[in-house]
Amino acid sequence: DGAINVFVGTGQNLVVGSRSSTLATTLNAYDATQLDIEIVTGAAGGGINITQSITGGKLGGLFAFKEEILDPTLNQLGRLAVGLSDAFNQQHSQGLTLNDVLGGEFFTDLTTTTAQASGDNDAATDYVFQVDVTDISQLTAKDYILEYDGANYRVLDYTSGTLVTGPAAMPITVDGLTISVASGTSIAANDRFLITPLRNAAWDMGVEVDDVSDIAAAGAVRAYESTSIANRGDATITAGEKITDTADPQYVTDAVFNTLGSFDVVFSASNPLNSPTVDQYTIYQGGAPVSGPTAYVPGVDTRIAYSGMEFTISGEPLDGDSFTMERNVGATSDNRNALELAALQSTPTLVNGGAGPTVDFQEAYGQLVSQVGTQTHQADVTGQAQQVLLQQAVAARDQTSGVNLDEEAAQLIRFQQAYQATAKVITTAQTMFQTLLDAVR
C-alpha cells in the first residue's frame, strides 16, 4: 500500500504503519554538559539510548565529528597543555628569583583531575577517584572507563571498549596516570567512572606568576674556582645544573634551601709518593671534611652531586686544586634557568607511539595541526565526491521520470498543426453547406 517502516540502531522502530516514536535528548551518563539521543518509550519519559547507533545523516555526521575529531583534538591539545605546564613548572622550581627564593609554579597545575561517576551507578556509591599525571612522557590522547567488578578494577579504552589494564587493586598506573581512591566509603559491582584527564586541560591552563620579580630566571646554585689559592691545573667546573636531588627532596623548599651552606671540592692524590696524579676528591664545609675521599679519573668529565647540588668537573686538576659550591644569592646577570626554560621547546618530552619521550612540544603541536588539517581536507574531498554522486543520481532520476523540453516542444508543434488542420476542415465544411443551401434557394 506504499507504506514505509523506519528503524534505527539495533531494530528500534521510529515509524511502523501509522504509529511513530518520539526522539528526545537526555543527559550523558557521565557528563551532564553533553547530550545523548533516546527513543521515548513511556509517557513519563525515559527510553532507549540510541546515540551510538546513529551512524548516518546529519546527526550521525555531528556525532562522528565529535567522537573522531573534536574530542581527540581537545585531548591532544590538553596533552600539550599538561606536558608544557608540568615540565615548565619543574624547571622553574630549579631557578632563583630576584628575591633570592626558589621559583614557584609558573603555570596552573593541571596534573590532577577527578573521574566522573556514571549516572547509572548504584545510588549508595560515593567513591571519588583521583587521577594524577605522574609521567608526562607516557601520556596519550585516550579517554578511559574505570570499571569495578565487585573485587577489582579494570581500565577500558572509552572509544573502543578494549581492556587497557586490570583486573587490579588500587592504585592503578596506566599510560602515565595514577588512579587512586580520594574519598568515599561505598562502591558497588558494575559501577563505572569516566576518566578524561586531558579534555579540559587547555581550557584550564593559566599563568600563576603575576610579578616579573617572581620569574626564576637565574640558576639556584653556583660554582667557581676557590679564591683562597689559585688552581694550578686546567680543570673547570660548570656553573651548576640543579638544586634538587632524589635523595634530598627537601631542598625544593625555600626554608631548607636558605640554610644550604658553602662547600669546597678539593682534589688530591691517594698516594702522592707513588701516584703523583690526582685520583680523588674530598668535599669540605668550614674546613672540615663532610664527604669523601671519592675516586676521580683525570681527564674524564665527572658529575659531582652533593647536598642537592650537581656540577660537572672537566679537565685535569692538580693536587690541592679546589672549587666552591654554594647558593647563588644575589644572582644578577644570570639567565641560566631562563635558557633551560626556553630549551624545553625543542626537548623531547612527549610520547609519539614509542616507549618514552620522542617528540618535543613544537613537533607535537605541528603534528596536531597537520592531523586536523588533513582530516578537514579529507572531509571536504569526501563531501565534494558525495555531491557529485548526488547530482548523478538526480540526473538519472530526471532522465527516467522527468520532462524532456525538446520533446515536449515538438509535441506542442504537432498538436498545434493538428488543431489548425481540424479548424481548416471545419471551415471547408461550413463553406460547402452554405454553397448547397444557396443552390436550392
Image (cartoon, grey):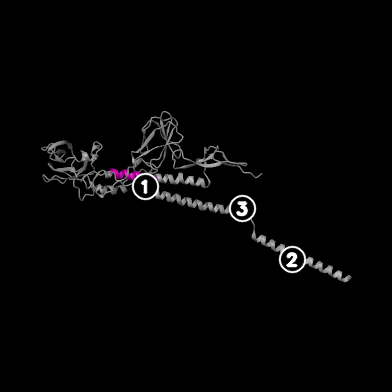
Instruction: Tell me what residue is drawn at x 61 percent, y 53 percent.
Output: 396
- Quarter of the figure with the N terminus: top right
The image shows residue 328 at horizontal and vertical percentages of 19, 45
How far apart marks 2 and 3 lie (CA) works out to 36 Å
Q: Mark 1 Cα within 10 Å, few/some/many (few <14, many 20+)?
A: many
Query: Label for residue 420?
Result: 2
Tell me whether circle 3 and circle 1 mark residues in contact (CB < 8 Å). Answer: no
Q: Is residue 355 in view from this perspective? A: no
How far apart marks 1 and 2 lie (CA) works out to 82 Å
At numbered mark 1, what does the secondary structure look like: helix, strand or loop?
A: helix
Q: Which residues are magenta?
A: 76-90
Q: Nearer the viewer, residue 216 or 343?
A: 216
100 magenta-colored: no
82 magenta-colored: yes
Amino acid type at circle 1 is: Ala
Relative placement, left or right, of 182 versus 273 is right
Q: Is residue 410 in view from this perspective? A: yes
At numbered mark 2, what does the secondary structure look like: helix, strand or loop?
A: helix
Query: Label for residue 89?
Result: none
Q: Nearer the viewer, residue 78 or 438?
A: 438
Q: Nearer the viewer, residue 205 or 141?
A: 205
**Residue pointed to by mark 3:** 397
**Residue pointed to by mark 1:** 364
The image shows residue 132 at horizontal and vertical percentages of 35, 38
Q: Main secondary structure of the magenta part?
A: helix
Amino acid type at circle 2 is: Gln
